[in-house]
Image (cartoon, rainbow, N blue to C red):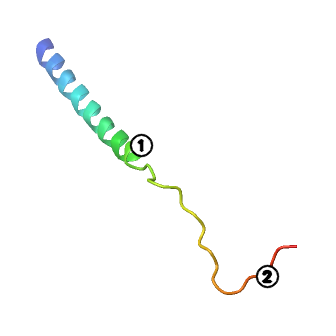
Amino acid sequence: METFLDFLREIMKGIVRETSAYHFRKNVLENKKTTPRRRKQKGGSQKPNK
């Protein structure tokens, strides 16, 4: 019975490790922005700053 529990414990460790690695990859590694975004320039004539 004890060996079965050890076996089950190892399976659960593997499942937890894989799911946490998946979520880490999704949330941290794949959310990098490639370039910083710039504000769009307004069209038309603009008043000069004084």
Q: Residue at x 83, y 73 (%)?
A: 49
- Which of discs 2 and 1 lies nearer the camera? The answer is 2
Q: Could you say which disc has been placed on residue 28 in the image?
A: 1
**What kind of element bears circle 1?**
helix
Left or right, 45 with reference to 12 = right
Using residue 3 as the reference point, say whether residue 20 is left or right of it.
right
Please name the residue shown 63% across and 83% down the image: 43
Residue 48, percent from left and from top? 81, 78
The residue labelled by disc 2 is 47
| 17 w.r.t. 28: above or below | above
> From what the image shows, is residue 12 above or below residue 39?
above
Q: What kind of residue is marked 2? A: Lys
Look at the picture and state if 4 lies above or below 17. above
| Inter-mark Cα distance, 2 to 1 | 43 Å
Q: Residue furthest bottom?
A: 44
Check the picture and name the quadrant holding the C terminus: bottom right
Write down the quadrant of residue 8 in the picture: top left
Q: Position of residue 41 (x, y in %)?
A: 62, 74
Residue found 64% across the figure and 79% down from its top: 42
- Using a 10 Å C-alpha cutoff, classify the residue at mark 1 as few (fewer than 14 neighbours), some (14 to 19) or many (20 or more): few
Taking the view exactly as shown, the residue that stands out farthest to the top is 2
First in residue order: circle 2 vs circle 1 = 1
- The quarter of the picture where the N terminus appears is top left
Q: Viewer-proximal residue, 13 or 24?
A: 24
Secondary structure under badge 2?
loop
Instruction: Look at label 1 and name its amino acid.
Output: Val
Q: Are marks 2 and 1 in contact (CB under 8 Å)?
A: no
